[in-house]
Image (spheres, rainbow, N blue to C red):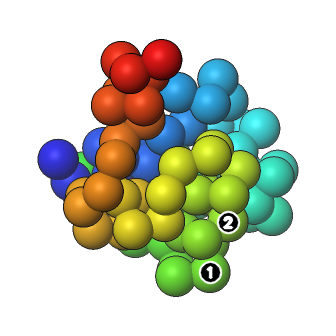
Amino acid sequence: MSPQQRIRLARRHAGLSQAALAAAVGVQRSAVSHWETAQGKSPSTEHMRQVALVTGVQFEWLATGRGRSPATRTARR
């Protein structure tokens, strides 16, 4: 899974729109859209950390794909 796919999965798992995530992180909605597209730019480390905090996922999983994904956590509940 790509970083872009992980950002989208984390956002959707948290029940947030792109606009809501953007407001929580302090960026424009278009930035979140770019982060989620295959050819888009990646967020800075600080923005990635904020996305992890806002969506409730582990930073390591969001940044690298290692660790527990939101889907894994949901399945174990």
Estimate the x, y position of residue 15 in percent, counting from the top left: 64, 23
* Secondary structure of the residue carrying numbered label 2: helix
Toward the bottom, the furthest residue is 45
Q: Name the element at disc 1.
A: helix
- Name, please, the residue furthest toward the front: 77
Three-letter code, disc 1:
Glu
Q: Residue at x 71, y 50 (%)?
A: 54
Residue 66: image x %, image y %?
Answer: 24, 61
Q: Camera-side residue: 39 or 57?
A: 57
Q: Residue at x 48, y 65 (%)?
A: 59
State yes or no: discs 1 and 2 in contact (Cβ < 8 Å). Answer: yes
Q: Nearer the viewer, residue 27 or 3?
A: 3
The amino acid marked with disc number 2 is Gln
Query: Which of the numbered marks, if any, corresponds to residue 19?
Result: none
Question: Residue 6 vs residue 66: left or right?
Answer: right
Residue denoted by label 2: 50
Residue at 62% x, 30% y: name it. Answer: 14
Q: Residue 5 at what x, y percent from top left? A: 30, 43
Determine crowd level at label 2: few under 14, some 14-19, many 20+ residues with C-alpha closer than 10 A: some
- Left or right of 77: which side holds 29? right
**Whole-percent x, y for residue 35 in the image:** 44, 57
Q: Is residue 60 visible?
A: yes
Q: Quadrant of residue 50?
A: bottom right
Foreground: 19 or 60?
A: 60
* Residue that numbered label 1 is attached to: 46
